[in-house]
Image (tube, rainbow, N blue to C red):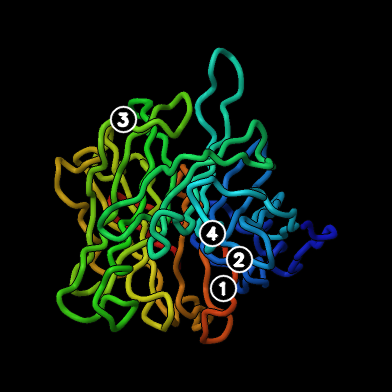
Amino acid sequence: MFFHSLTIVITYLAILAASAPISKRMITPGAVIASNFADPAFITVDNLHYAFSTNHEGMNVPMASSVDMIGWKLLGDALPKVGAWSNGQAVWAPHVVQLPSQNGQPGTFVMYYTARSIANPNFHCVGAATSATITGPFIARDEVFACSAGGGSIDPSGFHDDGDGRQYVVYKTDGNSIGHGGNCNNGVAPIVPTPIMLQEVNPANGYELIGGPTQILDRGPADGPLIEAPSLIRVPNTEAPGTFVYILFFSSNCYAGGLYDTSYATSINGITNGGQDYEKSSAPLLVTGSNDGKLYSPGGMTVGPMGVNAVFHADLGTTHTVRQMWYGTLTIKGRTVSIL
């Protein structure tokens, strides 16, 4: 199913974006996609921006395009058919990367996505799909990419490390799916871990695993029942010239309610932080009430590779029935990230 060139343009937002320098910290004063566009991810190809979201209105992966990150045209379903490992239900949180060029040819586009498993319908797992073009349609692989015995796997996000050329995927082990009830099914002791895992993949295809996954973060008491929605970047460390910092953005607490937030953690000891969990920031980046009270339950953030552009969702009103896409720009100084 395709939309009939439905373009969402908010004129005063476009004026704001055009006049604000890219280094200025900001969040748009209103949602840039006002319809349901949860768990958004974006990629920039040939100076055009493409966004993808959790399933909605009969589409597995709704897709939109923009010239300025402000006005968006909804294009249709980027993934008409999921892999044979899935029953096709609950297609969530897609993320698209373009692999490095091979033999002088443009790199393949790889989509990572979450869906419900046929083998265990109580679990969601991660699949992969590929396309020669950014607009697809993406063709799903029949084999599952990741499905942890600790509750399944969700919220995948691809990452290319410019430092050594390696390719990775980060995702959440969905421990709260086997929790013992309460908030997001993981508010009753014993609390089940919901770690963020780092998996190296073959940079030639984006889906062949290299070794096993490594934990880089897990929930703590301040995170409520879970952490999820990872997005990983690597940027120069302005506090230590010549070095780099890895920043892992994530959401914590339950998405259904006002405590859901966007946070981040950092490593200055390489992508695995020397085998230790990344160091969490002292306070979340976004919470309910941020942006002069305009945001409720902000989460699911994806950050571009340069650490400037970011998209995330926030609830329309105070329920998660409609989660709209917002856009903001970041400022990063050393290991500290600002958006407001």
Quarter of the rendering occupied by the C terminus? bottom left
Q: Are marks 3 and 4 in contact (CB under 8 Å)?
A: no
Q: Secondary structure at mark 3?
A: strand
Q: Secondary structure at mark 4?
A: loop
Which residue position is annotated with label 1?
323
27 lies above or below 128: below
Q: Position of residue 21 (x, y in %)?
A: 58, 53
Q: Which residue is mark 2?
A: 37
Which residue carries the number 4 mark?
Answer: 91
Amino acid type of the residue tagged 4 in the rendering: Val
Query: How much space separates mark 1 and mark 2, taking CA atoms?
Result: 6 Å
- Circle nearer the viewer, 3 or 2: 3
Residue type, numbered disc 2: Phe
Foreground tag (3 vs 1): 3
Task: Name which of mark 3 and mark 2 comes first in the sequence.
Answer: 2
Near mark 4 (Cα within 10 A), the count class, few <14, some 14-19 or many ≥20, is many
Q: Earlier in the sequence, mark 1 or mark 4?
A: 4
- Checking the image for residue 210, the label placed there is 3
Give the side of residue 209 with respect to residue 216, left or right. right
Can you give x and y, in whole percent of width and height, for residue 176 in the image? 30, 69
Is 338 in front, or is 164? 164
